Amino acid sequence: MPSTRTSDITVEELEIILEPQHARTPLKFGGVVVESLPFCRIRAKVENGLHEIAEGWGGIFVMDAWGWPDAAVSHEDKQRVMQRTIDGYVHLVTTHPGPFHPIELFMALEDDLARISREACRAEGVAVEQPFLNALVCASPVDAALHDAFGNVNGIDSYAGYGPEFMDDLSRWLGPEFAGEYPEQYIRDEYLPRVPIFHLVGGLDKLTRDELDGSDPDDGLPNCLADWIQYEGMYCLKVKLRGNDLDWDIDRMIAVYEVGREELDRLGIDEMHLTADTNEMCESPDYIVEMLQAIRERSPECYERTLYIEQPTGRDLEVHDHDMRPIAALKPVIVDESLTTLDTFDRAMELGWSGVALKTCKGHSSDMLFASKAGKLGVPYAVQDLTNPSLALIHSVGLGARLHTIMGVEANSRQFFPASTSEAEKRVHEGIFSLERGEADTSSLRGTGLGYQMDRILASGP
């Protein structure tokens, strides 16, 4: 039945803008190193039921290294498949009959996204199927642009558009127990004024000033963890571990803690939180259990400051169907790469995962549903990064500021891709791109849509 809500939208136009970007320093996670990749911007033009027209924007890195880390397929082939998937999804959205709410559209096209992902592989002669997670990365900037445009065309903050005036209730996607409930019940009415930011300590990152040498960039930014903490006062640190070198991982966690604690003491900041991420490299949960027990014995304070463990084992929960309760008995264990659909959410809970990681690169629409489900079940969740620069960072920090996260939001593009954000974006959202005592100031997130203030950004020049 066609919608009678005048707020629902039809898509008039979608523009794809791909921009090659190069890392300031290599980003290592799991078994990969990222040095360059495209950033995808999407400009959406929509019309609501009152025949009002507005634009919206979204953006994300086209990061196959995270969404499709299969060494059997070359980076170049993966990029071609992803770009074809983006093209296919844009065509799918622009030809889909409206009107609709953005969440309704995203969920309606879930199966079609999987189909065009398979078709993209065949068209590019790639025999290995693109993971659905990677297809979500391709669709996510379109989804973000539609949520931004939805708010702009209706003259509202996009997060105000998740109640009964604007959409069907959650039972449509989450089951009868959500009858009469809406995402607005599970999100904040306003942005938190300040949001703690997790700084990424990559596998190749230098920790101390003694490690610096002539190979480090000379661009005014810090080149080791100690200097980054003095520069921005971050008290939340996400540590990338190897997952297959126990002694190295134990030493690394403790070393990061010790460097962080020393530098934060100098700044008079007592608060400190660590998280650990092996990016699926562990063969079983036993590895993390042994690591945590060793850390607790060698450095009780490091263990105490460890907030949670992120995705230690493989992402396919049917193949890697480990019982995660032994880890959860020590520290919360958060599912990330495995979380792609509502079914994988349920499967993770069955296997004893403690909570979930939300990411804008999996779709803003999905995040609204995941956050609602987690909120009702009392499941903790985090907002993680995809090294989001530019509009993607503004969006992600805003998401973290509207949700009830375990702690803040990860944001590491300022470390690895600072040049991928325009000077205009930095001027308008200075408090997001320049931290103070480890936190982002969200006061610039205002106006309609996702709070980008795109009119000011465009008027402010390059």
Image (cartoon, helix red, strand yellow):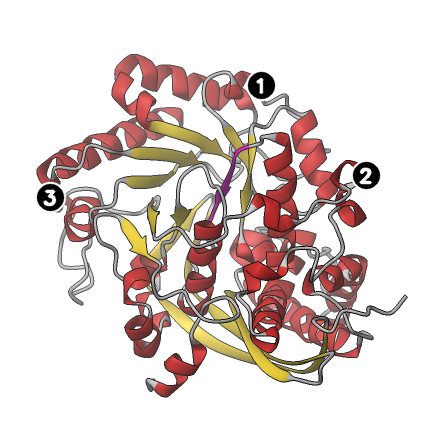
- From where the camera sits, is residue 237 visible? yes
Residue 275, given in percent of the width and then of the height, sits at 39, 34
Which comes sooner in the sequence, label 1 or label 2?
2
Q: Is residue 368 above or below residue 90?
A: above
Residue 164 is left or right of residue 314, and the answer is: right
Foreground disc of the pair 1, 3: 1
Looking at the image, which is closer to me, 127 or 133? 133
- What secondary structure prevails in the magenta region? strand
Residue 383 is covered by the magenta coloring: yes
Residue 284 is left or right of residue 401, and the answer is: right
Q: Is residue 148 above or below residue 328?
A: below
Which comes sooner in the sequence, label 2 or label 3?
2
* Residue shown at the point (52%, 55%) measured from the top left: 65
* Residue reaching furthest to the top: 297
Q: Is residue 360 above or below residue 327?
A: below
Crowd rating for badge 3 (residues with CA inside 10 Å; few <14, some 14–19, many 20+)? few
The dot on residue 210 is 3
Crowd rating for badge 2 (residues with CA inside 10 Å; few <14, some 14–19, many 20+)? few
* Residue reaching furthest to the front: 165
Quarter of the rendering containing residue 155: bottom right
- Give me the C-alpha separation between circle 1 and circle 2: 28 Å
Looking at the image, which is closer to me, 367 or 318? 367
Point out the stretch of residues depicted in magenta: 380-384
Residue 312, given in percent of the width and then of the height, sits at 52, 32
- Give me the C-alpha separation between circle 2 and circle 3: 59 Å
> Residue under circle 2?
176
> Residue under circle 1?
325
Quarter of the rendering containing residue 1: bottom right
Identify which amino acid the numbered label 2 is placed on.
Answer: Pro
Q: Secondary structure at mark 2?
A: helix
